[in-house]
Structure formats: structure tokens, C-alpha cells
Image (cartoon, grey):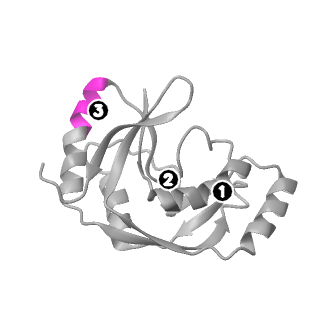
Amino acid sequence: MNYGIAIFPSKPVQDEINSYRKRYDPHYATIPPHLTLKESFEADNDRIAELIPELRNIASESEPFEIEVNKVSTFSPVTNTIYLKVEPIKPLDDLYEKMHSGKFPKNMEYNFVPHITIAQKLSHDEYSDIFGSLQMKDVSFRDTIDRFHLLYQLENGIWTVYESFVFGQDK
């Protein structure tokens, strides 16, 4: 089964982000707006049972932090993906690093660029039009992050929460 680890922003922030995603992101219906901490990886039940105590430990050692989003950006020319840039901060980098060390699979395909995707799998012409339009929008919000989620992918492609890990809770 496929698993991943992500942070979901608060509901008001998700609603704002979804106003863009519903038009431009084909994954809109399969997963809420999120910030990926660990790309999709395959694991069986035994492997997940090994990782859950690690995730609890990471969460217990973490404190809530604030993310700041203030810019639309892109991964072009690598891909025609448009995203909301999450300002890099140490607590976020630390979470990412912890989820790529120890017992966790080492599946880092790209360098960590904190972001929330709003458009992807666009043709070149679509990308140019949409990015040009979105770049002119004033995007700015802050959100407090106090948990991350272990997700799994259903057979129909939809991602759902397996377990949530709240920062600062005991193991």
C-alpha cells in the first residue's frame, strides 16, 4: 500500500487554496491542500507498525509553529507545476529531515521546497496563462501548524488519514 506524510493547513486556509485548486489541479478530489513532508512510499502493515512509534516520537518532540505563505511560484522548467510558496523555517526543515532518516525510507526525489500545489499537469500554454494570472494575485496568509498526518492511498487513488500526530503530546 502507498503511504505519505503531510501537513494540512487549517480549514479557512484550505478553502482559500481550494478556490485555485478546483480549477487547476487534477488531484483536487483525491487529497486536500497539503504540504508534503514525505513523498509516497510503499509499506506493508508490519513496516507501518514500526514507523508509527517513530512518528509519535517526532510529534512529541515538536512544538507548534507558524507557516507563512506570500507568493505564487513554479517548478518550471522542470515541471509545469504552480504552487504557493511556504517560507522555509527551521521547524519545518527539521520535520522533513527526521522523516528521511532512521527507519524511514530514503525516497527524496527532489530537494525540500516547502509548498502547497495549486496547479499541475498543465500543458505549456495552460501553464503560461495560469501562472501569469496567478502571479498577479495578492496571496498572503499565516497558519499555525500543530500536527502532521500519516496518509494512505485507497484503490481509487484518494488519500485518507491513517493516523494524526499532534505536536507535544506524550508518546
The magenta stretch spans residue 87: no
Mark 3: few, some, or many residues within 10 Å (few <14, many ≥20)?
Answer: some
Residue picked out by circle 1: 19
Residue picked out by circle 2: 34
Front of the two marks 3 and 2: 2
Residue 8 image offset from top left, x and y in percent: 44, 53
Q: Is residue 111 visible?
A: no
Front of the two marks 3 and 1: 1
Q: Is residue 170 left or right of residue 161?
A: left
Between disc 2 and disc 1, whose residue precedes?
1
Residue 141 image offset from top left, x and y in percent: 52, 73
The disc label shown at residue 115, or none: none
Question: Quick one: SS at disc 1?
Answer: helix
Q: Main secondary structure of the magenta part?
A: helix
Highlighted magenta segment, given as a residue range: 45-51
Residue 119 image offset from top left, x and y in percent: 69, 54
Mark 1: few, some, or many residues within 10 Å (few <14, many ≥20)?
Answer: few
Between disc 3 and disc 2, whose residue precedes?
2
Question: Quick one: SS at disc 3?
Answer: helix
Q: Quadrant of residue 90?
A: bottom left
Amino acid type at circle 2 is His
